[in-house]
Amino acid sequence: MRVLVIDDSASNRRAITQILESAPDVEVIDRAQDGAEGLEKARRLKPDLITLDLEMPRLDGFAFLRLLQQVAPTPVIVISSYAHRSDVFKALELGAFDFVAKPSRAAGLDTVRVDLLAKVQAVRQVQKRGGNLSEVRRGSEPTLLAVGASTGGPQAVHQLLMGLKGTSACVLVAQHMPPRFTRAFAERLEKAWGQSVTEARGGERPQAGCAFVAPGGKHLVVVRTEKGALELQVLEAGSADKHVPSIDRLFESVARCGGAAAHAVVLTGMGHDGAQGVGAIARAGGVVWAESEQTAVIPGMPQAAMKTGHVTWVLPLHELTQELAKSVG
C-alpha cells in the first residue's frame, strides 16, 4: 500500500511515517506539509491512501478534501487532536474514510499506532473487494432500536437516522469511537436529524422519537427498574473488554427489556462485535437487521452476525432504512 502523509508538523510526519512503515507491505511514498502541496502530490503520485492533518497553512484539510474528490479521489484517514473533535465529522461528510484521534502533541503519536494500522488494514480490505469509498409494548413504552457500528459507521448511522424521521422508536447507538468524540457525534446527528440525539449519561428514560449515543470508552445498556420503568445506564469498561462501547452488551440489554418488540441493526465494521448480541435479540423474539456488503464499507461485523443464523433481514443500507422505518412505525 502506497501512502502519502500530509501534516504541517515535521515531527508528526516522521512519526506517522515510522508507524505506517512498521506494517508489512506499507510504503510512505512521499510527505507534504500543507494541503496545496499534498493535492499536487496526490494528483501526480496517485497513492493508495492519504493520512491528513486538518489544520494546515495555505490549504487546510477541509479544502483539500473538497478538491481531492474532483482531481484524484483517494481514501483518506484524518489524524486529528481531541481538541478539534467536531471537525472530524465535517471531514467525514466531505469524504474522509475514517479518523484516528491523537491525544496531544506532547503525548506523541506512538499511542495511536494500533488504531492507525487497524484503519489502514480496513482500507486495504475495501480495496481488495473493489468497494467504493463511499411483543406488544408495555403501556406507552417506545420500541427499542439498538444500532451497532464500527469502521465507516458515522456516515451509516447518519443515513439510518435520516430515514427514521417521524418514527416512534427510541434509537440506542453503540458506535466504536474514542472518548470525547461521541458528544460531538451526537450533536452533529441531532442537527441533521432535527430530533433529540444526546450522548447518554445514565439515568435517562427512553422516549419515542429520540436517540442516545453510547459515550466513548463506556458501555450503554438499558435496564428495567424495580418499578418496571425503562432506564439507561452507562457502565465503566473492564480490563477484559475488547470493544468499548460494546455492541453485544447493548443488544443483550435491549433483548431483556424490549422482548419481541426489540430491533437490532448491525452496520459496517471490522470484527465480531454484535454477533453474540443478535442471538439474544432473536431468542427474545425481536427482529435483527444487517447491512449487506453491497453498501457496508467493511462487511466484517454484518457477516459475523449473519453467520449466527439469527439475522432476519440483510439489505443495502438505503433499503434497510426504508423497511426498518415501516417496521418500527
Image: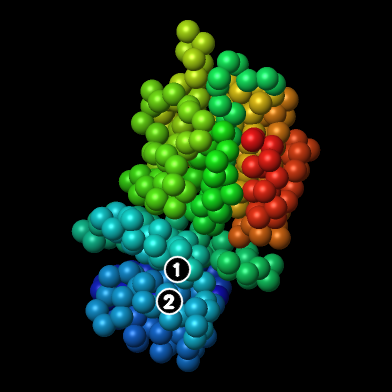
Give the percent coordinates (x, y) of residue 115: 45, 56
Q: Residue at x 63, y 20 (%)?
A: 137
Q: Residue furthest right?
A: 309
Circle on res. 196: none
* 192 vs 308, nearest the viewer: 192
Residue under numbered circle 2: 66
Q: Is residue 309 left or right of residue 12?
A: right
Give the percent coordinates (x, y) of residue 277: 63, 33
* 10 vs 257, nearest the viewer: 257
**Can residue 77 be seen?**
no
Q: Residue furthest top?
A: 227
State which quadrant residue 130 falls in: bottom right
Type of amino acid at the residue the image marks with label 1: Leu
Q: Residue at x 54, y 45 (%)?
A: 165
Give the position of the N terminus as an image quadrant: bottom right
Residue under numbered circle 1: 94
Q: Are marks 1 and 2 in contact (CB under 8 Å)?
A: yes
Neighbor class of circle 2 (other Cα within 10 Å; few <14, some 14-19, many 20+) is some
Q: Is residue 215 left or right of residue 166?
A: left
Give the position of the C terminus as an image quadrant: top right
First in residue order: circle 1 vs circle 2: 2
**Can residue 8 be seen?**
yes
Q: Residue at x 37, y 47 (%)?
A: 187
Dot 2 lies on which element?
A: helix
Dot 1 lies on which element?
A: loop
Q: Residue furthest bottom?
A: 44
Q: Is residue 56 above or below residue 214?
A: below
Q: Residue at x 59, y 29 (%)?
A: 143
Give the percent coordinates (x, y) of residue 179: 36, 44
Type of amino acid at the residue the image marks with label 2: Arg
